[in-house]
Amino acid sequence: MSVRYRTVLVGCGGRGRSHALGLLASPPRFELTAVCDRDATRARVLAAELGVPRVFTDAAAMLAAERAEVLCFATPPAVRLELVELGVRHGVRAVALEKPLALGLEEARRIAAVCDAAGVKGVVCHQLRHGRPFRQVKALVDAGGVGAVRLVHATARPSMLRVGTHLVDLALWLAGGPAAVSVVGRAEGVQAYAEDHPAPDHVTGAVELATGARALVEIGSRAPRHLGEDGFWGDVAVTVWGTAGHARVVLGGGWEAITAEGAVLSGPPDASPQEAAHLALLADWLDDERRVHPAALAPSLAGLEVLFGIAWSSLAGRRVALPLVGAPEGILERLRDALGAAPAVA
């Protein structure tokens, strides 16, 4: 039997609004009782627009007052662990947070450990897989439409911590969900370290999968360009190469495939928001322990480790095994210092 979960939201900017709309799209599953933002005006505006009854500027006060079961937050990426710990202290059953899981591997592991120790479910907003083009390509690949998967080529022009976890999530999912067992990486450029998602300007990684297939990941300023400048944020592409065909999705450009039977298929992009589908799966997981969310903390952490494995490999000058064991703290900061001030060439 489905249950309606009492939910609160921290962060009332653009991404927070998207999360709120995703919650409100499933009124039988979620009751959004309050929103919170340090900017009181922004919180009041969002609450008034969406009909949310209560507004707070302090997350602790909101959690104490609302007795929420689900804490959803879409804050700047430097604010993660403290909100997770706050939610756990106030007895939430689940946290739903914006990607990336964290800006550092140590914090990401701490978030996973805190939730695991408290029995709190956690999900990261890797919602792109719910879009129609990705689902169509997934169905084609799973049905053997391109033969056995040999290579997944995943590219994105936005930087590593902006879309990289989306990209790894999509690549592993479309490949059938195998574990990544090692990676060889290369990074360059430090200009993107000045952004709120600090990372190299560009990273490239060759990832060995447990099936024997490979994933080639290119993220940042030197990534292939499938769209014009006006399509920068939608220039996220995943191509699955099989033994008998291939299929490609470009987030802002649609999908195409040549199948094992020689059929040429294609379809348009899907610009509709996918947060509702992502969050509905969280409610299903809360209903039934067996229905684990595909973007739960464990697979999300594994995907983040692929990216940090690329960074560590670039820093160490060698292939590194996954999951990462014995990795130094502050990998991205160490890499920044090693890269120096020379930007990547676009």
Image (spheres, rainbow, N blue to C red):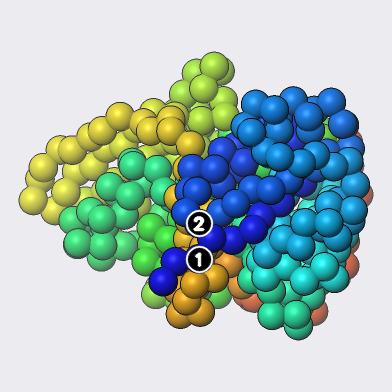
Amino acid carrying label 2: it is Arg
Residue drawn 80% across the image and 39% down it? 55
- The numbered disc on residue 3 is 1
Q: Secondary structure at mark 1?
A: loop
- Quarter of the C terminus within the rendering: top right
For disc 1, the neighbor class at 10 Å (few under 14, some 14 to 19, many from 20) is few
Front one among 259 and 68: 68
Q: Secondary structure at mark 2?
A: loop
- The numbered disc on residue 29 is 2
Residue 192, located in which quarter of the rendered image?
top right
Residue drawn 33% across the image and 49% down it? 135
For disc 2, the neighbor class at 10 Å (few under 14, some 14 to 19, many from 20) is many
**Residue 221 vs residue 78: left or right?**
left
Q: Earlier in the sequence, mark 1 or mark 2?
A: 1
**Percent x, y for residue 207?**
53, 63
Front one among 260 and 117: 117
**Residue 82 vs residue 187: left or right?**
right
**Percent x, y for residue 286?**
54, 70
Residue drawn 10% across the image and 45% down it? 262
**Residue 300 vs residue 36: left or right?**
left
Number of marks in the rendered image = 2
Front one among 30 and 86: 30
Residue pushed farthest bottom? 117
Q: In this picture, is 216 found above or below 209? A: above
Q: In this picture, is 303 found above or below 97? A: below
In 3D space, how far apart are the residues under numbered discs 1 and 2 (Cα atoms)? 6 Å
Q: Are marks 1 and 2 in contact (CB under 8 Å)?
A: yes
